[in-house]
Image (cartoon, grey):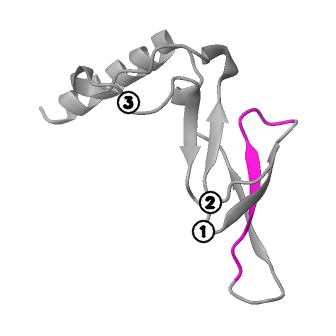
């Protein structure tokens, strides 16, 4: 696996061919429906990606981004925001609770 443009895409293959998601205001998001995460934290080409077998949604990615001839790179360990993969109803409920908390704090 390599990402020459220093980005990683996480795909939901069950969404291949689905309509692109809508952004606020009703416009399309600009990306395919099956891309659920675009990680652009690397500075060089991505050489490997591994999912943690024990912690759901924890990933490790490695890139070649050293400035010297001997090589070298960066290892990133990361976990996307859980709103990406939780059921919509849960996410909406949590966001509504947060919104109510923020509104209540202004009183």
Left or right, residue 42 beside residue 18: right
Left or right, residue 71 beside residue 66: right
| Nearer to the camera, 89 or 46 | 46
Q: Which mark is residue 43?
A: 1
Q: Is residue 107 above or below residue 62?
A: above
The answer to which of marks 3 and 2 sits earlier in the sequence is 2
Identify the residue at image location x=56%, y=31%.
36
Identify the residue at image location x=62%, y=60%.
6
Q: Which residue is mark 3?
A: 29
Please say whether residue 60 is one of the residues in the magenta stretch.
yes
Q: Position of residue 91 (x, y in %)?
A: 46, 19
The range drawn in magenta is: 54-66
Badge 3 marks a residue whose secondary structure is loop
Identify the residue at image location x=46%, y=14%.
19
Please say whether residue 73 is one of the residues in the magenta stretch.
no
Q: Position of residue 1 (x, y in %)?
A: 80, 49
């Amino acid at each position: 696996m390599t990402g020459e443009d220093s980005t990683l895409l996480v795909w939901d293959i069950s969404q291949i061919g689905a309509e692109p998601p809508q952004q606020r205001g009703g416009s399309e998001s600009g990306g395919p429906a099956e891309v659920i995460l675009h990680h652009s934290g690397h500075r060089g080409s991505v050489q490997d990606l591994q999912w943690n077998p024990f912690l759901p949604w924890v990933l490790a990615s490695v890139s070649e981004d050293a400035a010297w001839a001997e090589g070298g790179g960066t290892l990133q360990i990361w976990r996307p925001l859980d709103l990406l993969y939780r059921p919509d109803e849960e996410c909406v409920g949590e966001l509504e609770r947060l919104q109510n908390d923020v509104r209540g704090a202004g009183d």
